[in-house]
Image (cartoon, rainbow, N blue to C red):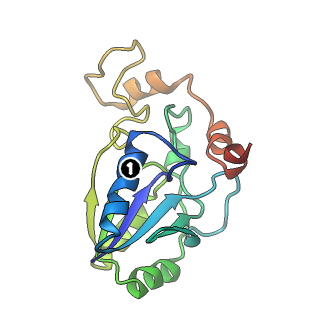
């Protein structure tokens, strides 16, 4: 079986429970399957088109990075929600060639951070089965932890509540720097 995993990154650059879980699963699956990892690429510089770029190899796992990703919010919320829903142009031919030449059958999403919805829809349209394992609440809470602005469990999901919770969160520029390869290098 040929499996493409999407995660925010891999150890040691990224850390945390979901990253470690995704990596451990990839290592085990790579013993009997062809495993590809797609990680969130550099966020500091924007490119003209989103595509899959060969990154490296870790054991039997071939690693690719997603160029021009959405900016992951990490442990923060986002003060400008529009930055998380910006329109992108992605290289359909590049992604189609990657999926078809590697005979990808399953795409396992470990987070939604950084990933454009339109890319997932495109890959699904190519006949790839999509599996989503929710390791965080990013898909339903921009602050990722389901705690409201008072620090208690959020009981309603609406724009006004989310705005209150995220009003003092970092800017997209701060998050782009915090997610950049330059930041990880330093």
Figure disc tally: 1
Report the quarter where the C terminus lies.
Answer: top right
Point out residue 16 in the picture as x, y percentages from the top left corner: 44, 39
Q: Residue at x 37, y 29 (%)?
A: 145
Q: Is residue 148 above or below residue 136?
A: above
Check disc 1: other Cα within 10 Å, few if <14, some if 14-19, many if 20+.
many
In the shown orientation, is residue 127 left or right of residue 71?
left
Of residue 32 and residue 175, the one placed in the foreground of this image is: 32
Q: Quadrant of residue 141?
A: top left
Q: Is residue 150 above or below residue 111?
A: above
Q: Quadrant of residue 179?
A: top right
Point out residue 97 in the picture as x, y percentages from the top left corner: 46, 85
Report the quarter where the N terminus lies.
Answer: bottom left
Q: Residue at x 28, y 73 (%)?
A: 32
Residue where numbered disc 1 is placed = 111
Q: Residue at x 45, y 21 (%)?
A: 164
Q: Secondary structure at mark 1?
A: loop
Q: Is residue 130 above or below residue 164?
A: below
């Amino acid at each position: 079986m040929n499996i493409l995993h999407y995660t925010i990154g891999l150890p040691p650059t990224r850390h945390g429970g979901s990253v470690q879980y995704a990596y451990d699963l990839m290592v085990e699956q790579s013993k009997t399957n062809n495993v590809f990892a797609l990680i969130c690429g550099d966020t500091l510089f924007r490119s003209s088109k989103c595509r899959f770029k060969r990154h490296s190899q870790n054991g039997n796992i071939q690693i690719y990075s997603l160029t021009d990703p959405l900016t992951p919010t990490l442990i923060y919320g986002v003060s400008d929600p529009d930055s998380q829903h910006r329109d992108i142009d992605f290289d359909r031919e590049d992604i189609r060639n990657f999926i078809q030449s590697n005979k990808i059958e399953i795409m396992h999403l470990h987070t939604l951070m950084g990933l454009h919805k339109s890319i997932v829809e495109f890959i699904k349209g190519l006949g790839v089965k999509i599996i989503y394992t929710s390791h965080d609440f990013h898909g339903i809470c921009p602050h990722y932890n389901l705690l409201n602005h008072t620090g208690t469990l959020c009981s309603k999901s609406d724009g006004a509540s989310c705005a209150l919770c995220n009003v003092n969160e970092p800017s997209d520029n701060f998050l782009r720097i915090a997610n950049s390869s330059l930041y990880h290098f330093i």
